[in-house]
Amino acid sequence: NKWSTFILLLFFFIGLSVMLYPAISSYWNSKTQSEAIVDYEQMIQNIPKEDYTSVFDTADEYNKQLAALSFPMLEYESINEYDEILNISGTGMMGYLTIEKIGLELPVYHGTDNDVLSHAVGHLEGTSFPVGGICTHAVVSAHRGLPSAVLFTNLDHLELGDTFQFTILDRTITYQVDQIKTVDPSVTEDLIIESDKEYCTLLTCTPYGINTHRLLVRGTKIDN
């Protein structure tokens, strides 16, 4: 009888843990994301304003070199020091993304490896840094439907005319959604840099839970 009671209690606590894991994990990730943004804001307050100019100049120069390549998403490795640009904290965080319509504020990191995408937004290497400027097209990505984090789960709620913002140091760059498309994962034509355009695309998997295609929510830069 004691063993039966123990086994029943064990199964009960295992079942309870499985049920509570998504909520607890999501809360923990949300807390971690918020702390990363607060730390970032506090850190940039200790950086002299005059240093901001050189940081942005370096990012702008990278974007110009990238736009000059024939195939930026294939040839980006010819440009050095990607990981150092905008990496003021040394953690790989370049700033944060805000999408007010879906109540989202997430740190943005260099690269799109699993370590980044499991808890934050990743900047797709081979695309422009999201600092604005003519002939730029930044692309950032995050997962949908993770039990441990919301991330881009509700990205499909955005509509034409909605806005999203990047905060990099003391600069806020606002983009207004002008195109929403679902494409095959192999299609990259909608991510290219176009002359005289200032684009940013939010990229995630779709349909929800199936993930056979990619949802592209593109914005064009507007005044804040």
Image: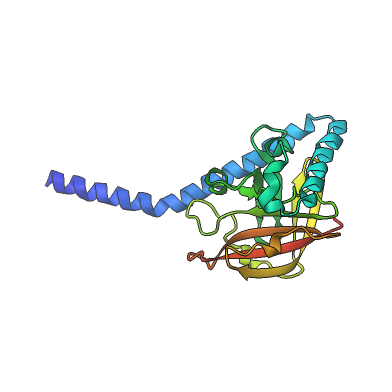
Q: Which quadrant would residue 3 be assigned to in this image?
A: top left
- Residue 24 lies, in percent from the top left, at 47, 48
Image quadrant in which the C terminus is located = bottom right
- Residue 59 lies, in percent from the top left, at 79, 42
Q: Residue at x 60, y 63 (%)?
A: 154
Colouring rule applied to residues: rainbow
- Compared to 189, does 63 lie above or below? above
Number of residue marks: 0
Q: Which quadrant would residue 158 be assigned to in this image?
A: bottom right
Residue 30 appears left or right of 1: right
In the orientation shown, which residue stands out farthest toward the front?
A: 70
- Compared to 14, does 200 lie above or below? below
Q: Residue at x 63, y 62 (%)?
A: 155
- Compared to 45, does 170 lie above or below? below
Residue 133 appears left or right of 4: right
- Compared to 62, does 208 lie above or below? below
Residue 81 appears left or right of 205: right
- Residue 165 lies, in percent from the top left, at 75, 54
In this view of the protein, which residue sits in the foreground, 168 or 139? 139
- Residue 172 lies, in percent from the top left, at 80, 49
Q: Which quadrant would residue 50 be assigned to in this image?
A: top right
In this view of the protein, which residue sits in the foreground, 115 or 10? 115
In this view of the protein, which residue sits in the foreground, 142 or 83? 83
